[in-house]
Image: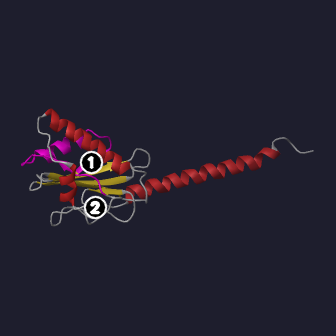
Amino acid sequence: MSSPQRGKRPVFTVAIVIVGSVLAGCGGLLVMSLAAPAPGNLGVRGGRLAACPGSPNCVSTQAENQEHWIEPLQTEAADDSAISLLAEIVREQPRTTIVEQTGDYLRVEFRSLLFRFCDDVEFYHDRRSGLVHFRSASRVGHSDLGVNRRRMEQIREQFQRRLAEAGGAASESRGRVLALAGVR
């Protein structure tokens, strides 16, 4: 006769293997996300931010295709106040680090809650056009399930609301913004 405990051993062993595999995979993702260095192409060169890679985990106001393009912010500010306001807005977001801030440029790192994946976000205030260009891209992976686009739209809403509260909302039409951005 076999004991009732003997039949449960294979199920217990399979459960241990599955749990161990899941934990190892999660640990690997965490290590990968923390070890990924910042891209070397960040910053403004010739009035432009870096182009988005071919993957869908990036949005940019200067992208030349609709998949990655997002509308820039509009401002009438001719000084450092637009970047200062954006810095104030991102400081209120969870898991953010301001890496660099000048009068016309802001670079921020956003980390995800679960695996601490890092997204690099840049803002560039082009005072000649009255636009604040930005780029938001994930450091690792292929798809971000729209996280970068949603985050930037939320920042846009906060920026526009605070400008309106301060009486500085811009009045440019969407058509002019599209033309200035050079979207094809």
> Quick one: 67 or 142, which is closer to the camera?
67
Q: Is residue 91 magenta?
A: yes
Instruction: Tell me if residue 162 comes above or below residue 110 in the rendering.
Output: above
Helix, strand or loop under label 1:
strand
> Quick one: 125 or 66, which is closer to the camera?
66
Q: What residue is shown at x 26% (from left), y 38% (from top)? A: 92
Mark nearest the camera among 1 and 2 is 2
On the rendered structure, is 171 left or right of 4?
Answer: left
The residue labelled by disc 2 is 63
Q: Quick one: label 1, few (<14), some, or many (20+) residues within 10 Å?
A: some
Amino acid type, callout 1: Thr
| Residue furthest out toward the top | 165
Amino acid type, callout 2: Ala
x%, y% of residue 162? Answer: 18, 36
Marks 1/2: CA distance? 25 Å
Q: What residue is shown at x 78% (from left), y 44% (from top)? A: 8
Segment colored magenta: 69-98
Q: Are marks 1 and 2 in contact (CB under 8 Å)?
A: no
Helix, strand or loop under label 2:
loop
Number of numbered discs visible in the structure rendering: 2
> Quick one: 141 or 10, which is closer to the camera?
141
The residue labelled by disc 1 is 97
x%, y% of residue 41? Answer: 26, 66
Q: What residue is shown at x 22% (from left), y 56% (from top)? A: 178
- Residue 95 figure quarter: top left
On the rendered structure, is 96 left or right of 85?
Answer: right
Which numbered circle lies on residue 84? none
| Residue furthest out toward the right | 1
- Which circle's residue, 1 or 2, is located before the other in the chain? 2
Instruction: Tell me if residue 4 comes above or below residue 14 in the rendering.
Output: above
Q: Is residue 8 magenta?
A: no
